[in-house]
């Protein structure tokens, strides 16, 4: 069999493994695999550095199927080039399989990112490319290129339409991420019709304007042209690359090729049979992998494994010469925190005036920057407001681009070794890029913005939780306490919306020391993301000699201030989070002063952590016998009923805010100690 015949055999094997999986499931997207299989084959067999025997090899190339609806293509590749059993393709989209309808990174070895929402995968890949550039700048030594991998993406028309991809591509061009290569499957068809209805721009020209190297392949079946384009992209190290590959969706299908009917539905038995005949493929058996294809692909696998083994030898030599950075690299990729990393975190003295929790966060971050080198992140052009910089840790920028001199904006210089990421006004891309850093491995990434803009980032936050990523989202300016900027910038419903996301830790600390614990929890939470919700305004730093130890934050809620020892159960329980915690403390003092009420104050910075505690602990904090309860939070009251019950009440915000100084807005909305005390008096029976 000639080389061309072997190539065709392997491509058709990929195509029809995908088509048969979709047909058996009676659900899925056959069009993309039929059209994009040639470019995927060239990439995986000739260029992609990977090792199926070690799917998490640190310097492997990353492949992201941003067009996640074409997941059957990826599963076919993972069977032929990896260790995904053929039975998993037979169970495509079925209960309990490792081949879900859209790829999930935590479920299927070899899947680098959970994709599906279009544009997210391409944007994740930008974060992955940032990760490679940073690790190379930090750890590579002369003669020892330990990190030199590339990030490859297969994207669709839908991906490049999405705004998040536009933001991410703009950022990648600015950062000159030359090891990022995107194969754009330009088939001019989306779910409901041809792109001519809605999408007639010159995508290549747009990406060129972003600062990308752009190439075109006129025929998606031209393996030589695809090969040359990929080689050109690899040779281009100063710019990310977009290769526009013109394909035919549903290639080979007699009646459905080139139409939207091939996009999101099975071809059907008759069309499938005719497509196989059209491309010279036997109708039976299904899920056919010819021995000649297996033998040919095995050569690629052996070469891939040999490349990985060569890297391991290089890393062993690096370890002998540079044992300390080698140990740090291993620790980072094994997700082990440094010894005594939290020992020097600041402990804040009691202070009635106090500080904003965003400012306390800044103090914590500076010590974390010193002890946790894998911590990296930034904000959506809001460093002076979110205080989310790592001072003296440098700015992640291409060498020689600083407009402000060699020290950059945070000190420490401008280079890929910098740990401060400047995302610009691109919150959508920021959320996806920090997820990409988490997918990459070796990082604890964070992204910061105002809480109200978490709405822009919600798809990325949701995917971080779904994918069990160790991503930290920092949200400041957390309520109507923001003040003069008014209701467009004052968060009201955002905390409730974030709490609705499964497996996301939403932590709203009540003072500076709770903020320190919030960061510790976020750093330690390896298998789920955290959202830290912080104030703009100053809040008192509570005297821990008088109040309960701050370690109670780890349990989500704890009794901060209780009724006298030995006294009967409290008359009322005040439950608060964030800036309203000190308000609850002040209200408790009023209630005790006017008739000796027995009052318990509970700090509840994290609902999810509290709900994960034992029933015994939860009942000890919120005794079921005490029905009189008041929850206090400067946000939507939605959800608090689970803690206050039918007999309790919530002092919350169930309308939009107003433009005025923060203290005025808070007072006018009822966030005063006396109003909270009145609410408590109203529920005491």
Image (cartoon, rainbow, N blue to C red):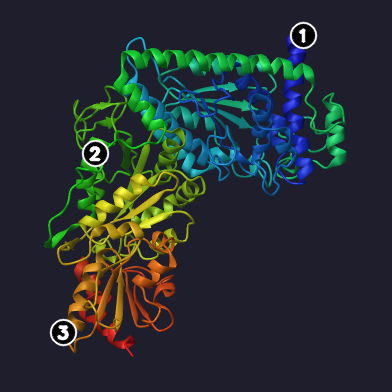
Q: Is residue 398 left or right of residue 344?
A: right
Looking at the image, tell me whether mark 2 or mark 1 is earlier in sequence order: 1
- Residue 114 position in % (x across, y down): 54, 41
Looking at the image, tell me whether mark 3 or mark 2 is earlier in sequence order: 2
The quarter of the picture where the C terminus appears is bottom left
The disc at residue 390 is 2
| Residue position marked by numbered label 3 in the rendering | 593
For residue 22, say whether it is visible: yes
Q: CA distance from mark 1 to mark 3?
A: 93 Å
In what element is the residue under mark 3?
helix
- Residue 383 position in % (x across, y down): 25, 44
Q: Residue 215's image quarter?
A: top right
Pair 3/2: label in front: 3
| Residue position marked by numbered label 1 in the rendering | 2
The relative height of residue 458 versus residue 219 in the rendered view (above or below) is: below
Looking at the image, tell me whether mark 1 or mark 3 is earlier in sequence order: 1
Q: Contact (CB < 8 A) between labels 2 and 1?
A: no
Pair 1/3: label in front: 3
Closer to the camera in the image, 16 or 278 = 16
Mark 3 neighbour density, 10 Å: few (under 14) some (14–19) many (20 or more)? few
The disc at residue 478 is none
In what element is the residue under mark 2?
loop
In what element is the residue under mark 1?
loop
């Amino acid at each position: 069999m000639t080389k061309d015949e072997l190539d065709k055999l392997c491509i058709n094997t990929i195509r029809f493994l995908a088509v048969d999986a979709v047909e058996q499931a009676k659900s899925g997207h056959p069009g993309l695999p039929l059209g994009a299989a040639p470019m995927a084959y060239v990439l995986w067999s000739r260029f992609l550095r990977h090792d199926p025997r070690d799917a998490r090899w640190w310097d492997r190339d990353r492949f992201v199927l941003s067009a996640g609806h074409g997941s059957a293509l990826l599963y076919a590749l993972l069977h032929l080039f990896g260790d995904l059993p053929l039975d998993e393709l037979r169970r495509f989209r079925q209960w309990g399989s490792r081949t879900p309808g859209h790829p999930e990174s935590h479920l299927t070895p070899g899947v680098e990112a959970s994709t599906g929402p279009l544009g997210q995968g391409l944007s994740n890949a930008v974060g992955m490319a940032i990760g490679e550039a940073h690790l190379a700048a930090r750890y590579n030594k002369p003669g020892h290129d330990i990190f030199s991998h590339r990030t490859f993406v297969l994207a669709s028309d839908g991906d490049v339409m999405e705004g998040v991809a536009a933001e991410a591509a703009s950022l990648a061009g600015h950062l000159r991420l030359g090891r990022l290569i995107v194969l754009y499957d330009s088939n001019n068809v989306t779910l409901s019709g041809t792109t001519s209805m809605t999408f007639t721009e010159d995508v290549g020209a747009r990406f060129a304007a972003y600062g990308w190297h752009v190439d075109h392949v006129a025929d998606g079946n031209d393996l030589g042209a695809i090969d040359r384009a990929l080689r050109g992209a690899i040779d281009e190290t100063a710019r990310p690359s977009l290769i526009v590959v013109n394909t035919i969706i549903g290639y080979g299908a007699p009646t459905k090729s080139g139409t939207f009917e091939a996009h999101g539905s099975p071809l059907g038995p008759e069309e499938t049979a005719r497509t196989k005949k059209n491309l010279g493929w036997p109708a039976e058996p299904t899920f056919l992998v010819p021995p000649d294809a297996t033998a040919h692909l095995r050569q690629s696998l052996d070469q891939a494994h040999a490349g990985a083994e060569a890297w391991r030898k290089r890393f062993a030599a690096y370890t002998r010469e540079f044992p300390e950075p080698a140990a740090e690299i291993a620790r980072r990729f094994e997700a082990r925190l440094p010894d005594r990393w939290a020992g020097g975190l600041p402990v804040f003295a009691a202070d009635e005036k106090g500080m904003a929790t965003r400012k306390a966060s800044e103090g914590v971050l500076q010590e974390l920057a010193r002890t946790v080198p894998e911590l990296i992140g930034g904000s959506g052009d809001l460093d002076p407001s979110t205080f989310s910089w790592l001072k003296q840790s440098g700015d992640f920028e291409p060498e020689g681009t600083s407009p402000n001199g060699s020290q950059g904006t945070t000190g420490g210089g401008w280079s890929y070794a910098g740990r401060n990421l400047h995302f610009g006004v691109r919150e959508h891309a920021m959320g996806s890029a920090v997820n990409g850093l988490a997918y990459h491995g070796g990082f604890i990434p964070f992204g910061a913005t105002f809480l109200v803009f978490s709405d822009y980032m919600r798809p990325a936050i949701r995917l971080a939780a779904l994918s069990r990523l160790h991503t930290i989202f920092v949200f400041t300016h957390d309520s109507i306490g923001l003040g003069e900027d008014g209701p467009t910038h004052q968060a009201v419903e955002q905390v409730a919306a974030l709490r609705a996301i499964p497996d996301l830790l939403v932590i709203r600390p009540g003072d500076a020391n709770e903020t320190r614990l919030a960061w510790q929890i976020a750093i330690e939470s390896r298998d789920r993301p955290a959202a830290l919700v912080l104030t703009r305004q100053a809040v008192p730093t509570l005297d821990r000699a008088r109040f309960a130890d701050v370690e109670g934050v780890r349990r989500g809620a704890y009794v901060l201030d209780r009724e006298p020892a030995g006294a009967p159960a409290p008359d009322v329980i005040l439950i608060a989070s964030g800036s309203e915690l000190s308000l609850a403390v002040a209200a408790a003092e009023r209630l005790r002063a006017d008739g000796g009420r027995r009052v318990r104050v509970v700090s509840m910075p994290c609902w999810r952590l509290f709900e994960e505690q034992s029933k015994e602990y939860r009942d000890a904090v919120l005794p079921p016998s005490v029905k009189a309860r008041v929850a206090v939070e400067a946000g939507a009251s939605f959800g608090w009923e689970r803690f206050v019950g039918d007999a309790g009440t919530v002092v919350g915000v169930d309308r939009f805010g107003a433009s005025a100084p923060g203290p005025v807005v808070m007072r006018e909305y009822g966030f005063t100690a006396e109003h909270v005390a009145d609410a408590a008096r109203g529920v005491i029976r």
